């Protein structure tokens, strides 16, 4: 990871507090006016996405991106209303959710992606994730997309099949909100088991779908999904048999 120097066209970065990630340049702490502007920008972006015909809006509050930096006690040392206890650190996300929900029709879902743990001591953890997920539900979020990590450089993450599923399961059970699970879910039966066991309401497939963009069709075939429910283009329906 390296910052792009200003003379090469890089731009100064901003954050809740002046804390640099890994070897990257030091960000500048945002003013409250700038925070309000970013919240309005999220709503404007959601409005454009709705106008463009997207069927769901997902707010990215995970992986060390700006919203995640506000949530996390390791990256947010603000002493104003956007920092401090969980309510303060959550304010930026919840105001974005309210602003986005305000422009997205009730008929379309609003999702939030969250990191359930930093995999680092003293940081964001599952308990805080469950609390924020309850708040998100109260603010009209339809589903929490449960991922992990991204804010602390160089931590060791025990990556293996289903490694983030237990976090999704806990959020679903304890916050009472629908969740997706993600992370090394690569096989149709493996994905189906997560749903059947009630560990998640949906699964997400990342790298397996990069390797095989028709992953959902292959899975539908393998699992015997009725063709009327499988997402074949009409001219490809014979691929189901
Ligand atoms: C090439 C690539 C780019 C990614 N970019 C993003 C991203 O911009 N935002 C994000 O939330 N996750 C991103 N991810 C993470 C995936 O969304 C997913 O959570 C992760 O790959 C684990 O799922 P998988 O094992 O099914 O790939 C990316 C993953 C890959 C492989």
Image (cartoon, rainbow, N blue to C red):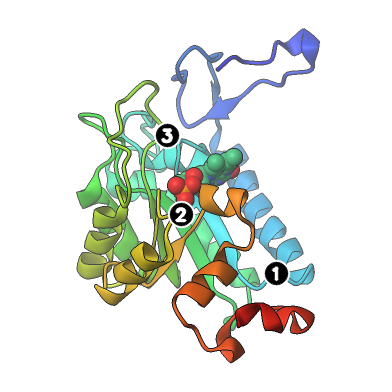
Q: Position of residue 164 (x, y in %)?
A: 31, 50
Q: Nearer the viewer, residue 168 or 213?
A: 213
Do residues under tags 1 and 2 come within 8 Å of each other at their CB atoms?
A: no
Residue ID for mark 1: 54
Name the foreground residue: 172 vs 196. 196
**How far apart are the alpha carbons under marks 3 and 2?**
12 Å
Q: Residues within 10 Å of mark 1 (few under 14, many from 20)?
A: few
Check mark 2 vs ligand 1: CB closer than 8 Å? yes or no: yes
Q: Position of residue 111 (x, y in %)?
A: 50, 64
Name which residue lies at 27% across and 67% down.
199
Instruction: Give the quadrant of residue 103.
Output: bottom right
x, y percent for residue 108:
59, 77
Describe the element under mark 2 as helix, strand or loop: strand
Q: Is residue 231 visible?
A: no
Q: Eyeballing the image, is 188 above or below 71?
A: below
Q: At 32% from the left edge and 56% from the top edge, which residue is drawn?
A: 132
- Disc with the residue nearer the chain's start (3 vs 1): 1
Write down the residue under mark 2.
113
Q: Secondary structure at mark 3?
A: loop
Q: Residue at x 37, y 72 (%)?
A: 201
Work out whether mark 1 precedes mark 2 in sequence or the reverse, and give the earlier one: 1
Q: Residues within 10 Å of mark 2 (few under 14, many from 20)?
A: many
Q: Are the residues flagged by discs 3 and 2 in contact, CB closer than 8 Å?
A: no
Res 67 visible: yes
Q: Is residue 237 left or right of residue 56?
A: right
Residue at the (60%, 83%) spot, across then down? 241
Residue 147 against residue 11 in the figure, above or below: below
Q: Position of 14 compared to 236: left or right? A: left
Kindly state the secondary structure of the residue where label 1 is placed: loop
Instruction: Give me the disc on residue 127.
Output: none
Name the residue tied to disc 3: 150
Of mark 3 and mark 2, the one earlier in the sequence is 2
């Amino acid at each position: 990871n390296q910052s792009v120097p200003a003379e090469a066209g890089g731009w100064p970065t901003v954050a809740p507090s002046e804390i640099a990630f890994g070897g990257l340049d030091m960000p500048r702490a945002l003013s409250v006016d700038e925070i309000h502007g970013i919240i309005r920008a999220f709503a404007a972006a959601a409005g454009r996405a709705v106008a463009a015909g997207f069927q769901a809006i997902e707010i990215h509050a995970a992986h060390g991106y700006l919203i995640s930096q506000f949530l996390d006690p390791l990256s947010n040392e603000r002493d104003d209303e956007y920092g401090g206890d969980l309510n303060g650190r959550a304010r930026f996300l919840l105001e974005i959710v309210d602003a986005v929900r305000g422009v997205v029709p009730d008929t379309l879902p609003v999702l939030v992606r969250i990191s359930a743990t930093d995999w680092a001591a003293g940081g964001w953890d599952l308990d805080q994730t469950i609390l924020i997920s309850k708040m998100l539900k109260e603010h009209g979020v339809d589903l929490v997309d449960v991922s992990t990590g991204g804010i602390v450089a160089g931590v060791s993450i025990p990556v293996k099949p289903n490694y983030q599923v237990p976090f999704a399961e806990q959020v679903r059970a304890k916050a009472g909100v629908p969740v997706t699970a993600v992370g090394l879910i690569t096989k149709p039966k493996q994905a189906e088991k997560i749903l059947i066991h009630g560990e998640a309401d949906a699964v997400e497939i990342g790298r397996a779908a990069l390797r095989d963009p028709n992953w959902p069709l292959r899975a539908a075939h393998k699992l015997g999904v009725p063709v009327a429910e499988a997402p074949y283009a009409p001219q490809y329906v014979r691929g189901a048999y």
